[in-house]
Amino acid sequence: MNFTPLIGLAATAAVVWIAIIQPSPKPEVLLDWRSMLLVLGGTAAVALVIFPLQKLLDLYRFVIYGVVLKKLPSVAEVAKQIVTASALGPKEYELYPLCPSSHRFLTEGYQLLAENILNEDDLREVLTRRSQYFKSNYLNDAKILATLGKFPSALGMLGSTVGLVDMMSGLSKMGQAGIGEAMALALVTTFWGLIFTYLFFMPLSDYAMRLNSEDNTLRQLIVEGILMIKRREDPRIIVDKINGFLALQDRLVLKKSALPEDYWREAQQQAAKVRRKKVA
């Protein structure tokens, strides 16, 4: 489970409560349920106008499985798993599905290698298309969130405008003493519109963009790694090529434990474990 976004949303709610709502002379004014209903209900209604219901359900699944439950494996971990698979012999392709894998896309790549049907060009095409599918999904989710993020603040302004109209129309009745309270109530909708736009929808949109970038890099690494295994490149060479995908600190760690002979011995030991799985 990915706790960081949840912690961020909880911290945002805590900051809004402690810094804005709690110190207010009348917190109940800021917690006006009609203002929140206009902002959230209006945004949901506009979403149904713009997007098909299935797209919104996919967005809901992204928030649950992409934000709350999703946790990408480290690039260095996947890199080591690829090198382990490369230590298998040229006729041991049926053992690839038994190799360690912390990413579903890597598991799919192992399966394609085990089937041994596709040549290198066809394998690249299949893997690239599958990778592009996930990239387009993340981008679509980010665009939907960015689009929806425009409406809470706009609906907040609409609610405030209506509140000001009502206040001005009843100005003769409420007198000077009631102007301040009526003005405050009119601006509450704008407050909630800004909260949901800049502290919910826009951060989630940026998160989807970042997740897309990280996942795309990881999938590129897997595609290149699977193709290098298909070409039967030396694992020592694969280590050097894979290092191009790693951050400097990960690259140094990998090199430290993977200086050719030491890492080759470790990869052979992992490959031996895979062979024992088949026997078992």
Image (tube, rainbow, N blue to C red):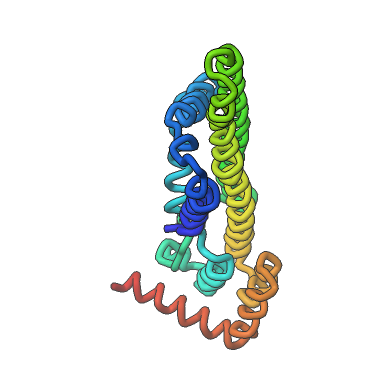
In the rendered image, residue 134, in percent from the top left (x then y), is placed at 55, 44
Residue at the limit of the structure toward the bottom, as seen here: 262
Q: Quadrant of the C terminus?
A: bottom left
Image: 134 above or below 107 = above
Residue lying at 50% horizontally and 53% vertically, measured from the top left: 18
Image: 110 above or below 161 = below
In the rendered image, residue 206, in percent from the top left (x then y), is placed at 62, 46
Residue at the limit of the structure toward the front, as seen here: 176
The image quarter in which residue 1 lies: bottom left
In the rendered image, residue 59, in percent from the top left (x then y), is placed at 49, 36
> Between residues 192 and 181, which one lies in front from this camera angle?
181
Is residue 109 visible to the viewer in this orientation of the structure? no
> Viewed as shown, does residue 248 lie left or right of 91?
right
> Between residues 143 and 116, which one lies in front from this camera angle?
143
Residue lying at 60% horizontally and 62% vertically, measured from the top left: 225
Residue lying at 57% horizontally and 36% vertically, measured from the top left: 191
> Viewed as shown, does residue 114 lie left or right of 180?
left
Is residue 267 visible to the viewer in this orientation of the structure? yes
Image: 230 above or below 167 = below
The image quarter in which residue 99 lies: bottom left
In the rendered image, residue 61, in percent from the top left (x then y), is placed at 43, 40
Q: How many numbered marks are there?
A: 0
> Between residues 248 and 18, which one lies in front from this camera angle?
18
> Between residues 17 and 22, which one lies in front from this camera angle?
22
Residue lying at 59% horizontally and 23% vertically, measured from the top left: 176
